[in-house]
């Protein structure tokens, strides 16, 4: 199902936006957006508390989101306090409406901040952040707690909401949205400046679903 969603073309996404406009006020739909590229995301370094800027390419990625998002009437726009997420919201055209939400911050990597996974695994074979967490940082239960708290808040809303956040926290949020353990977040891949949509099944409005995952403009271009 995720693969099929990923391959939908630009016309389908446009129809989704129009549908969201027609459904305004009737059902929550969460547009979860990862920030654009940074030097550390490009090199694979874990970036939690470090407040790093977007690269020039990351800024271009963020600007490419604007045509996707401009037709959607958002009731709320929430962003992580980190500048890479806030800047992405600005370049995507939603910065003026953005409110800072601390629970959207990336996983606190503690002692593993700035490190690469292969280096961590050499010192700690078999390490998996979704199972083991980070010494000096957050445990999976703590990150799940943030995600669950945010989801409880979102489910009091009934319109379109945009969230600007980070890679591994987005994976946890998606897992918790559909009610599966944090460990299942390891099966989600989320690229920089990707659009992900969390919603509810069309004919079963009580069932949370992932409508779209890890989509970027280049994938949905009719010329891709």
Image (tube, rainbow, N blue to C red):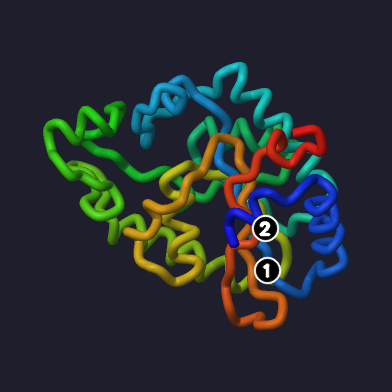
Q: CA distance from mark 1 to mark 2?
A: 7 Å
- Residue 159 picture quarter: bottom right
**Considering only order in the chain, which callout, 2 or 1, is on the residue closer to the N terminus?**
1
Q: Are marks 1 and 2 in contact (CB under 8 Å)?
A: yes
Question: Residue 196 appears at what percent x and percent y?
Answer: 61, 51
Query: Which residue is tagged 2?
Result: 161
Residue at image coords 50%, 40%: 81
Q: Position of residue 2 (x, y in %)?
A: 58, 57
Residue 175 vs 8, above or below: the answer is below
SS type, badge 1: loop
Secondary structure type for disc 2: strand
Where's the C terminus, which quadrant? top right
67 shown above or below 175: above
The residue indicated by pointer 1 is 28
Residue 222 lies, in percent from the top left, at 81, 38
Q: Is residue 190 left or right of residue 13?
A: left
Q: 203 or 85, which lies in front?
A: 203
Horizontal relation, residue 179 to residue 94: left or right = left
Q: Is residue 78 visible?
A: no
Q: Is residue 78 above or below residue 148?
A: above
Q: Quadrant of residue 110?
A: top left
């Amino acid at each position: 199902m995720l693969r099929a969603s990923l391959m939908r073309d630009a016309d389908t996404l446009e129809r989704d936006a129009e549908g969201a406009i027609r459904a305004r006020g009737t059902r929550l739909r969460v547009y979860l957006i990862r920030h654009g590229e940074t030097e550390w995301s490009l090199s694979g370094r874990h970036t939690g508390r470090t407040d790093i800027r977007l690269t020039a390419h990351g800024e271009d990625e963020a600007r490419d989101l604007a045509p996707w998002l401009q037709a959607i009437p958002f009731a709320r726009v929430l962003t992580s306090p980190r500048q890479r997420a806030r800047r992405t919201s600005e370049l995507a055209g939603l910065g003026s409406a953005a409110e800072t939400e601390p629970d959207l911050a990336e996983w606190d990597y503690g002692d593993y901040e700035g490190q690469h996974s292969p280096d961590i695994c050499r010192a700690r074979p078999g390490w998996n952040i979704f199972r083991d967490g980070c010494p000096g940082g957050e445990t999976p239960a703590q990150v799940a707690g943030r995600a669950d708290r945010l989801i409880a808040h979102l489910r009091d809303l009934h319109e379109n909401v945009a969230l600007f956040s980070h890679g591994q926290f987005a994976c946890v949020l998606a897992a918790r949205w559909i009610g599966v353990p944090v460990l299942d977040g390891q099966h989600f891949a989320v690229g920089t400046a990707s659009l992900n949509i969390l919603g509810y099944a069309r004919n079963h409005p009580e069932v949370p679903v992932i409508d779209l995952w890890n989509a970027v403009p280049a994938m949905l271009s009719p010329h891709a």
